[in-house]
Amino acid sequence: MPNITMAQAINSALKLEMERDPDIYVAGEDVAGGVFAVTQGLLEQFGEKRIRDTPITESAIIGTAVGAAACGLRPVVELMFVDFVGVCLDQLFNQAAKMKYMFGGKARLPIVVRTMCGAGAGAAAQHSQSLEAWFMHVPGLKVVMPSSAYDAKGLLISSIRDDNPVVFLENKTLYFTMGEVPDEAYTIPLGQADIKREGSDVTLVATGRMVVLAQEAAEKLAADGVSVEIVDPRSLSPLDEETILESVKKTSHLVIVHEEVQFAGSGAEIAAMAAEKAFDYLDAPILRLGAPFTPVPFSPVLEKEFIPSVDKIMATVKKVMGK
């Protein structure tokens, strides 16, 4: 298998699916050029009818996608930064998410909303947020967050083929991470977590970029005699509760790490679920590690402090183990 970046893996998924299904089109700001080269080359192959550069108007991007999907097309639309979702909340939360329910299941809304998230690129408070918990709270939306090039391709293909609206969150700092990815199309089921590392002492549930940092932390903790099992949910809605609970039952300790603000983040839902369904198996309180309750700083020093780090993950794991 070739070793490619996550950006190239996403590009490959889009290309293969557009070749397979002529009803798929891509639209968004600068998708013809391709931010971070994710959609690079698609315009030359598929033309302006299926690769649509849009004005800077998120409400129109999502609004037209809702109408197009309801009429039989399969739009894959890009919001350049997740921070701008506030401009199109009505189109996404009140229309795309609810239309199937309000039409008694007769409407299909096969929409994928790709968007960049995450801090660490010096993009300041309005271009660096992680807002996955916003989307998780809306019935009717599926929420997907890959952490590797392999997962990104398989999950995106599954998202495109799904008949429901999917929010596909791509951490911008992961675009140029490398991984082995097959040339051909393949799918990863939505709602199926992946155990990235097996362990016996602590379950560490991590999402997005935090999966990469968790793996580094687990390597260092192993030298201290702590065996960490890393669970990557891959999709936050639907959430693979079974895989998380089975891991917790094995390790009896749970730490959850995400880049979102810790208060009311996705980790709160995972912690509540585990407390309700695996309380008798826990030997210590569930611990969460997320960002502080503040906008993302522009200052490089403060931004580095804002993002959960390998050292903070290690300290949290040691704390839950009573070390």
Image: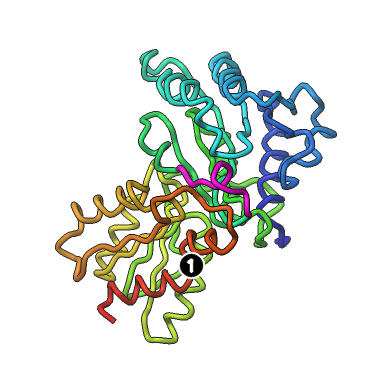
For residue 163, above or below residue 256? above
Where's the N terminus, which quadrant?
A: bottom right
Residue occupying the far right of the picture: 44
Q: Position of residue 170 (x, y in %)?
A: 57, 47
Residue at x-position 48% and y-position 67%: 309
Q: Residue 140 or 28: which is nearer the viewer?
A: 28
Q: Is 182 positioned to the left or the right of 94 in the image?
A: right
For residue 66, above or below residue 118? above
Q: Is 110 positioned to the left or the right of 17 in the image?
A: left
Q: Is 264 positioned to the left or the right of 107 in the image?
A: left
- The residue indicated by pointer 1 is 309
Residue at x-position 51% and y-position 36%: 167
For residue 50, above or below residue 199? above
Category of crowding for the residue at label 1, using alpha-carbon neighbours closer than 10 angstroms: few (below 14), some (14–19), many (at least 20): some
Q: Answer whether residue 240 is magenta in the image.
A: no
Q: In the image, what residue type sits under mark 1? A: Ser
The range drawn in magenta is 122-131
Q: Is 149 positioned to the left or the right of 211 in the image?
A: right
Q: Position of residue 130 (x, y in %)?
A: 49, 47
Residue at x-position 33% and y-position 75%: 200
Q: Secondary structure at mark 1?
A: loop
Residue at x-position 83% and y-position 34%: 45
From where the camera sits, is residue 213 visible?
yes
From where the camera sits, is residue 149 visible?
no
Q: Residue 169 occupies which quadrant of the picture?
A: top right
Q: Residue 73 occupies which quadrant of the picture?
A: top right
- Main SS, magenta region, reads loop
Residue occupying the far left of the picture: 280
